[in-house]
Image (cartoon, rainbow, N blue to C red):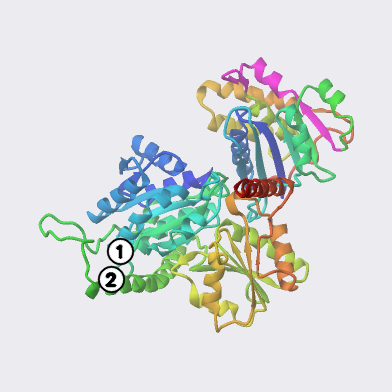
Amino acid sequence: MKIIDTANHAVAYAAKLARVEVVSAYPITPQTQIIEEISRLIDEGIMDCEYIPVESEHSAQAALIGASATGVRVFSATSSHGLAYMHELLHWAAAVRLPIVMVNVNRAMGPGWNIWCDHQDAIAARDTGWIQLYCASHQECVDTLIQAFRIAEDHRVIMPVMVNYDAFVLSHTYMKVEFPEQETVDLFLPELDPMWKLDLDNPMTHGSVIYPDDYEEVRFSMQQAHGNARKVISEAAAEYRVIVGNYHGDLTEEFMTEDAEHIIVAMGSIASEAKMAVKQLREEGLACGVVRIRSYRPFPVEELQRVMRGKRTLVVIDRDCSFGLEGALFSDVKAASYGHSDARAYNLITGLGGRDITYGLLAGAVRAAVEGKAETVRWPALRLNEHHLASKRGVEAAWQGRQKRSAS
Amino acid sequence: MVEIRFHSLGGQGAVTLIRMLAIAGDKIGKEVQAFPFFGAERRGAPVKSFARFDDARIDVRSQIYIPDFLVIMSPTLMDLGLSEGLKPDTVILVNEPLEDAKAKYKDINHTLLSVDATSIALELNLEVEGMPLVNIPVFGAISYATDIVPLEVVTEVIRETMGKKNMEVSMEAARRGFTSVLEVNGKAPARRRKPLPEVAR
């Protein structure tokens, strides 16, 4: 079946194809149309699923944890402040090892209030133990969601997976999506075979007190699960390619990297825009390529080490900022390629709060980096215009006035 | 690639329009992309929307700054639309009666076409809460002005996506939009360019 629709609607239908059994969600802002569409599919009898509406995202994640612990396939969706509000339970879901799959539509954090795209919400949830996958097209959103259940439920992994895609740029944009047949999806994604579940005949407890004697081992097992997930993500992508026919890359997707001297690293839809920048730069004589990060956690360490070997320039695009340092992805890419590459490394922090970033702007910023004319960390789309300067002067004037008053 | 930028008011139905336009583009075998940019999401507020059509996969994800076609769905948005970027051969389509457009836009050096979509909507009682639904007549006018999708495909999309209640009247609105496109400034003849090659449907 082919549709022209938004990624939100497409993903709702993909959840149906994945035979999700329980959905729990808080249906109000910053929720997306995914949940609205799923509730419609359930209401019209198209989707056989239990929908639990709750009063907050914190409860939504708690209900997912409860449902998943009974050994059923669960799904939810959230965004920005919703993800932040369930943060405590994100740790919970990962530490008791539940194969929950959730979509996070990447939106900026407030204040200032902003519903548009950046990655700050997911980056802030980076160290919870969730696997984080990022998509760059509508078709990839659908295919990655179906793959996410395979990855989460694989007995070598058993970890929650967060499927990220960009607000508006994908979530509210109409593009073509082709759905595989239900039988094809069933072939790829067998029934959930839970590693453990709550069982009345065999009562046990999960997530209770762990003393210092055991805690570290539990955390080490989570790190091992992420290590295993590297292999499982690649396997899932390869098998999906065979069974369904679509392929968007493994932990990374590479574009024109083979003969490239300069590498752009990015994730999400801006990595797609970066491909356009690469085409333009190649026409201008610069051998550039793109590495798109599909799996941010686990991080594609070996892939980056291999691709960065012998390269001259590294430009990492961040749609987030780790305040007080630099873009979070920039730190990660540098750490991964440490000792494996002598490339000069540059960071573009850009596209925050939905600022529209064109490939022309990216091409210019990459060229400046290649020519050594850029600072290490740069905000290339910054516009310090009269509006911003006036507000800065206003703050300064108010501050000076206050100091004068307190002196007199 | 063909790129269109729309300027409309919240409530005029631009999002429905770009969605139907994308479906129409897909029907003639094009890769399509259509998206709105919302500011304040409310009735009467300016909305920008964008549509792309290409033969190859569309990788670009940013907005459209130098469109091939600029569609102004309310005359109040003409200045805004002009200020947000054009190229020398951008063709402009405005929802405004011909005489008004002729009187107002003497300085515009682009091919300018008019369609009185508001009157068409009012004649056919296409209104939502007192606001004329101009999107369908504009859909028909775009078919004429841009030559991207033929009128038969426009009416086919309307038949498939509209509820029974409004289907017939909407198809009529699209047909009237298609036949009501007029040349405003004589910078170029408002005749259709050569038709696109037949694509397997």
Which element is circle 1 on?
Answer: helix
| Distance CA(mark 2)–CA(mark 1) | 8 Å
Q: In this image, B105 relative to A396: left or right?
A: right
- In the figure, A116 relative to B72: above or below? below
The front one of A51 and A343 is A343
In magenta, the rendered stretch is B110-132
- State if disc 1 and disc 2 touch (CB < 8 Å): yes
Tell me, yes or no, whether the highlighted magenta stretch contains residue A102.
Answer: no
- Residue ID for mark 1: A95
Does residue B200 appear in the picture of this structure? no
Category of crowding for the residue at label 1, using alpha-carbon neighbours closer than 10 angstroms: few (below 14), some (14–19), many (at least 20): many
**Of callouts 2 and 1, the N-terminal one:** 1
- Residue ID for mark 2: A218
Q: In this image, A168 relative to A394: left or right?
A: left
Residue type at mark 2: give it: Val
Which element is circle 2 on?
Answer: helix
The front one of A399 and A218 is A399
Parent chain of label 1:
A
Q: Residue at x 33, y 40 (%)?
A: A55
